[in-house]
Amino acid sequence: MVNVEARETISLNGEWNAIIDPSGSGDYRQVWLDKKPQLKTDFFEYSFEGGPVLNVPGDFNTQMKELNYYEGIVWYKKPFNYSVKSGKRVFLHFGAVNYLADVYLNGVKIGSHEGGFTPFQFEITEKIKEGENSLIVRVDNRRLPKGLPGVGFDWLNYGGITRDVDLVETDVSFIEDYFIQLEKGSLNTVLGWVRLNGNQAKQEVTVEIPELDLRHVANTDAEGFAGIEFNMKPELWSPSEPKLYQVIIKSKTDVVIDSIGFRSIEVQGNKVLLNQQPIFLKAVNIHEENPYKRARAFSRDDARILLESAKELGCNMVRLVHYPHNEYMVKEAEKMGLMVWNELPVYQHIQFSDSLVPNKMENMLNEMISRDKNRGGVVVWALSNETYPGTANRDKELIELSEKCRANDSTRLVVHVTNSQTYRDHTFDIQDTLFLHSDLISINEYIGWYIPWQGKPSETKWKVAFPDKPIFISEFGGEAKFGNNDTPQDEAANWTEGYQEQIYLDQIEMFKTTPNLVGVSPWLLYDYKSLGRMHPVHQQGFNRKGLISEDGEKKKAWYVIKDYYSAEKDQIPK
C-alpha cells in the first residue's frame, strides 16, 4: 500500500538483536526457529540473546567497526507484543532492506524480497498472534552478478534494514492505492484513479481538496478500481512556489490524507517545460549518505541536511543517484521546492541477457513508481545509468522498460543516462540508440578529469544524432581533497581544490557551446564513501568529487557552481 505514513501504524523501529553470519551457517542451523534448550543435553550453536544489538532503521556497517566493509548475512530479531483486534487486517511493511530479505514471523517464513531501495510488505492477519510475537529477518547484502545493481558500483554497499519497519492496521476493506495528478500537458484536469482492497466491488469513493472546495465522487468496479477525472484551478507547484494541497481520499471504511502538489512537466521540441514554461534544470547529484555520520541516510533530519545544502547551492532539482532514495528525501525535497530525479539501480555491468534480470528491473520500476507517483516534485523517472551499447540485449530490454514506464505513468519524463559518447578532435559525438526512447539526451562526461581537454573549452564542437532533443549534462567534475591548496594547482595528480575549480570554470565555458542545453548536474554534492577509491593520501576511501567535503567544508568549486546558478535564470525565455 502507498503512503504508509498516513495509516494506522505501530513502529517496529529501535533496537533489534542480531547474529552476524559470514559463513551462511544460519540457514543450515535454521536460525529463524530461534530454538532454546529444553533438556540438559540440548544446545544450539547460535543465540540472539547476548549478541550484538543493531538499530533499525540503519545500516549495519557503521554500527559495528568489525562490519565496516562487511558484505554478507546478518540475522535480525525483534520481539514485540500485539493485541489482536477483531475486524482488522495487519500488514508488515518495510521501507527497504539491502539487498535480499527473508522474513519469518513466529518461526514461519512469510515472504522474501529482492532489491535494496524500494518498499515491500506482507499481510500477516492470520499469522500474528495475541501477546508476544517474534520477527526474524535474514538480510544479505552480498553483490550478485545478476542483481540490481550488479557486482561493481561506486558507493559503499550499506547493508541491513535501512529504512522504517511498521505494522499497518486496516479495516477489511481499505484504500490500497491511488493516483491523483494532473493529466499530462494539462494545468487543470486531474486524471487518476483509486483502488480498494477487500470487499471492494461497487463502493463509493470520494476525493476531496478542501482548500479548493472540491469534492469528487466515483464508484469502484468489481475489482475495486475507480477512475478519477475532474477539473480544478490549482495554484501550481513550482520551485519558487512549492504549493501542496491537502487531499483526502475516502471510502466507506477508510480515509487516507495526503499532501499533493500539482504541476505539469513535459518536453516540447528542444525545451523542458514546467507548467508550460521553459525551465533550466539547476541540479546536483546526491548519494543517500549522511556525511557527518558517515552512514546511510534514512531519516527526515538526514534528508534536510542534504537538501538544504542543495538549496544553498542554488538548485531547483536534485538527482537522487543511483537508486531510489528514502521517502523522506522525496517528500522533503517537494516541500522545499526541489524537483526530484528518481533513478533505478540499473548501473553499468547489468546482465540484460539473463532471463531473470528484466523481471527484476520491471519489479523495481513498479515499486519506485508506486511509492512516489503522487509526489508532484518528482519530474523524472531515470531507468538506467552508464550502461554499455555493446551489452547483449541491453537495447531491447531498456526500450521495453521505457514503454512499460510510460504505460505505468505518462506524466513524467523518462530518461536514460549514458557515457557512451566519444570525444575526439575537440568534438562530442553522441549516437546512443537509447536516446530515441529518452525524453532527454542525458550524458555523463568528465572532460578535464578522466579525459583531458583537446583545445579551448569555448571552442568545443557537438555532433548529435538527435539534434532536436534537449541535452542535459547529468555528471561532470573532478576530485579534490579539501584544504589541498599548497601544491601546484595545475596538475591533476595533486588533487587540489584549484585543479577542480578550473575544471568547473572550463565546463561552464563549454556549456555555452552545448546545443539545446536544458540543465546540468555536477558530480556531486558531498564527498562520499567508496571502496574503489584507494589513494591513501588524497582519497582515503572517499570519492572526492564532492563540492563539499565529508566534514561539511565547501571547496572552491562550490562557489563556481553557486555563482553560475545565481546568474542562470530558472525560466528560459521562449
Image (cartoon, rainbow, N blue to C red):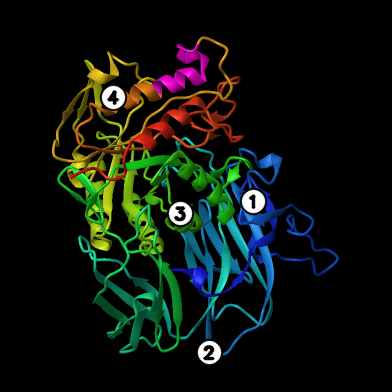
Of labels 1 and 3, the one closer to you: 3
Q: Residue at x 37, y 32 (%)?
A: 564
Q: What type is the residue that disc 3 sits on?
A: Met
Instruction: Estimate the spatial distance between the alpha carbons at disc 4 and disc 1, rounded to whole Å.
Output: 56 Å
Closer to the chain start, of discs 4 and 3, is: 3
Magenta residues, as a range?
489-503
Which label sits on residue 336? 3
Closer to the chain start, of discs 4 and 1, is: 1
Q: What type is the residue that disc 2 sits on?
A: Gly
Decide: marks 3, 2 in contact (CB < 8 A)?
A: no
Q: Is residue 501 magenta?
A: yes
Of labels 4 and 1, the one closer to you: 4
Residue 393 can be seen in this image? no
> Residue tagged by mark 2?
87
Which label sits on residue 25? 1
Q: Residues within 10 Å of mark 1 (few under 14, many from 20)?
A: few
Magenta stretch secondary structure, dominant: helix
Q: Quadrant of residue 487?
A: top right
Of labels 3 and 2, the one closer to you: 3
Q: x%, y% of residue 328? A: 50, 57
Instruction: Estimate the spatial distance between the alpha carbons at disc 4 and disc 2, rounded to whole Å.
Output: 64 Å
Q: Identify the residue at the far top of this view.
A: 488
Instruction: Estimate the spatial distance between the alpha carbons at disc 1 and disc 3, rounded to whole Å.
Output: 47 Å
Q: Quadrant of residue 411?
A: bottom left
Closer to the chain start, of discs 4 and 2, is: 2
> Residue tagged by mark 4?
510
